[in-house]
């Protein structure tokens, strides 16, 4: 064989491999086994390849019919409602393929006037609590915990869904999923089609619930052009309904409740017990040999970091919540630990968060805060002594009283990226520099950056280059506030700590400044002191605003 002949043979052999579409075949029959399942796709390379994938949901009794042939049982346009006239009457229909088949993806065509729209089934979105991100066009599952998990991702024409989510939906609806593919690959070929006969193949398997057909056809519109068409189906069987994990099939099995440290034995070994509320004691004699439902369980302070740092959650005095989805009472009145009642962990904290709390669980190293004890066991309304809670109460009260006195807030509402800064401010949950920098930044943003500068200088002469704290100082002096020097000095220190430490911590100057400021205090001790001093300023400004309101009212 000459070199040219060998080259031509090798090129022909590669073309035949392309015509067989074996890689595509293997990929299709694996679709539905991995973490993502392709439910919609289209592709076209002019003169070389085109095709698409689709999905339909089918009744369980349709499996035999589906496996009879490789043809699609539903069109991409199915799911658009309309009317049908049977000669006797005109009736409305939701989809022409119902009830045997229903689309998971509905293609809404506008015939070139505007772009076509690919929609995800309403039933699927509503039942599985899917939210569409308007920027990425992807869908997220809003879980019972409040966490957002990517559920459907869209890239160009391809749409993929998380396989576990799809199977939970199939379980809930007791429907099978039928995956379809139709793919064409072309090449130039002037030879006899009989030479390509071994490409043609078809297979039907009721055991694996798959079928496919591959055949060669000649393109009569293009001389010397041939194509192979690969048509295939695969059925994903509906799991048992209890696998959907949707009410009333969402009860946590008793053996899945984790155990938490509740005490130490005589040898100092940790004593653990399940957080399953049904396995705990109460005041009415239930489970007399078990720990009480109200047994406090203790955790490191940074168990709350993930909640402070996410705008989806709110950590406030004695309560952690995620919107209106869930909430749990806790004792966050102590600086060295957080505690939650054992039964509340199992009842109120989402199952998907249990491992997080378990990782921060510690043996009891103290007692509940006085405020928590009086609230929980004596039904007394008392304020928390935690410096964070005292600061936030004073800050909110100041804004109300200031607006009552002058008609505007001393500090503006935080917006956009800074919107959650007030909730994120906290006593550092650990001694890391990153945590200290973050809280210095938050404190300066709340106290200095958000000053209502425009309102502060109303009725006063403008001073070129005057900054926010200078405006506040002039306003307070004009209104004869008692602690101008003390409070402006404190706010300048807060501002300086943010600029010198939070923004430039890597510099030697910033580190030297930090060490000088800290002295022999830890990061947490230093910020506690700074927040307590700031709280006193807020309280004094509040009294100042109240006296001004009283004078103006008089």
Image (spheres, helix red, strand yellow):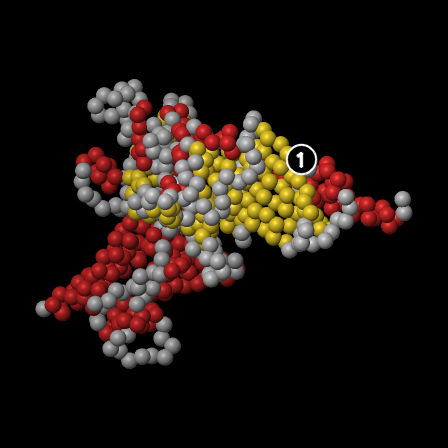
Q: Splitting the image into 4 quarters, where does residue 257 fall?
A: top left
Residue bearing mark 1: 201
Q: Splitting the image into 4 quarters, where does residue 535 fall?
A: bottom left
Question: In percent of the image, x 64 and y 43: which residue is there?
Answer: 229
Camera-nearest residue between 432 and 196? 196
Question: In percent of the image, x 26 and y 78: which residue is there?
Answer: 460
Q: In the image, 318: left or right of 152?
A: left
Q: In the image, 42: left or right of 139?
A: right
Q: Name the element at disc 1.
A: strand
Camera-nearest residue between 266 and 104? 104
* Above or below, 455 relative to 198: below
Rendering coords of residue 234 (x, y %): 55, 35
Q: In the image, 459: left or right of 69?
A: left
Q: Splitting the image into 4 quarters, where does residue 547 fall?
A: bottom left
Residue extending farthest right: 2
* Above or below, 282 relative to 367: above
For mark 1, does the 10 Å Cα neighbourhood hold few (<14), some (14 to 19), or many (20 or more) residues?
few
Residue extending farthest left: 554
Q: In which quarter of the image is the N terminus?
A: top right
Residue extending farthest front: 87
Residue 457 visible in the picture = yes
Question: In percent of the image, x 72 and y 42: which residue is there?
Answer: 17
Camera-nearest residue between 71 and 316? 71
Camera-nearest residue between 480 and 22? 22
Rendering coords of residue 370 (x, y %): 25, 39
Rendering coords of residue 75 (x, y %): 49, 45
């Amino acid at each position: 064989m000459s070199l040219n002949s060998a080259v031509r043979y090798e090129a022909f052999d590669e073309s035949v491999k392309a015509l067989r579409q074996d890689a595509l075949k293997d990929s299709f029959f694996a679709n539905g086994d991995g973490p993502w399942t392709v439910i919609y796709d289209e592709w076209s390379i002019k003169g070389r390849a085109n095709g698409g994938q689709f999905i339909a949901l089918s009744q369980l009794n349709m499996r035999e019919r589906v496996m009879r042939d490789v043809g699609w049982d539903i069109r991409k346009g199915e799911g658009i409602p309309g009317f049908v006239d049977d000669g006797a009457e005109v009736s409305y229909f939701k989809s022409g393929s119902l009830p045997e088949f229903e689309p998971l993806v509905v293609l809404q065509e506008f015939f070139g006037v505007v772009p076509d729209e690919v929609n995800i089934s309403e039933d699927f979105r509503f039942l599985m609590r899917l939210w569409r991100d308007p920027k990425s066009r992807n869908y997220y599952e809003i879980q019972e915990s409040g966490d957002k998990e990517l559920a459907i991702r869209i890239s160009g024409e391809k749409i993929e869904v998380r396989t576990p989510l799809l199977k939970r939906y199939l379980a809930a609806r007791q429907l099978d999923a039928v995956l379809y593919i139709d793919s064409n690959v072309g090449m130039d070929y002037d030879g006899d089609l009989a030479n390509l006969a071994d490409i043609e193949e078809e297979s039907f398997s009721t055991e694996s619930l798959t079928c496919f057909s591959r055949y060669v056809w000649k393109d009569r519109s293009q001389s010397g052009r041939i194509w192979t068409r690969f048509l295939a189906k695969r059925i994903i069987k509906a799991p048992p309904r209890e696998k959907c994990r949707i009410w009333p099939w969402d009860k946590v099995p008793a053996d899945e409740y984790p155990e938490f440290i509740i005490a130490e034995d005589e040898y100092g070994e940790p004593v653990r017990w399940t957080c399953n509320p049904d396995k705990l004691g109460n005041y009415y004699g239930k489970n007399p040999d078990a720990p009480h439902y109200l047994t406090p369980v203790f955790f490191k302070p940074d168990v709350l970091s993930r909640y402070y740092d996410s705008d989806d959650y709110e950590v406030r005095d004695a309560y952690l919540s995620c919107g209106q989805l869930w909430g749990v009472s806790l004792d966050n009145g102590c600086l060295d630990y957080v505690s939650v009642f054992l039964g509340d962990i199992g009842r109120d904290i989402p199952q998907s968060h249990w491992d997080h709390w378990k990782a921060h669980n510690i043996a009891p190293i103290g007692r509940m805060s006085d405020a928590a004890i009086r609230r929980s066991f004596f039904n007394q309304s008392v304020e928390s002594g935690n410096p964070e809670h005292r600061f936030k109460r004073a800050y909110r009260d100041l804004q109300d009283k200031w607006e009552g006195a002058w008609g505007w807030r001393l500090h503006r509402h935080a917006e956009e990226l800074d919107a959650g800064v007030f909730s994120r401010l906290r006593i550092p949950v650990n001694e890391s520099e990153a945590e200290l920098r973050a809280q210095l930044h938050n404190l300066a943003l709340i106290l200095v950056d958000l000053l209502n500068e425009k309102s502060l200088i109303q009725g006063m002469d403008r001073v070129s280059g005057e900054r926010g704290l200078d405006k506040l100082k002039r306003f307070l002096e004009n209104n004869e506030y008692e602690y101008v020097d003390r409070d402006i000095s404190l706010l300048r220190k807060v501002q300086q700590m943010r600029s010198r430490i939070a923004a430039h911590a890597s510099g030697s100057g910033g580190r030297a400044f930090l060490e000088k400021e800290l002295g022999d205090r830890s990061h947490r001790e230093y910020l506690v002191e700074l927040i307590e001093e700031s709280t006193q300023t807020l309280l004094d400004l509040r009294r100042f605003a109240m006296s001004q309101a009283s004078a103006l009212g008089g």
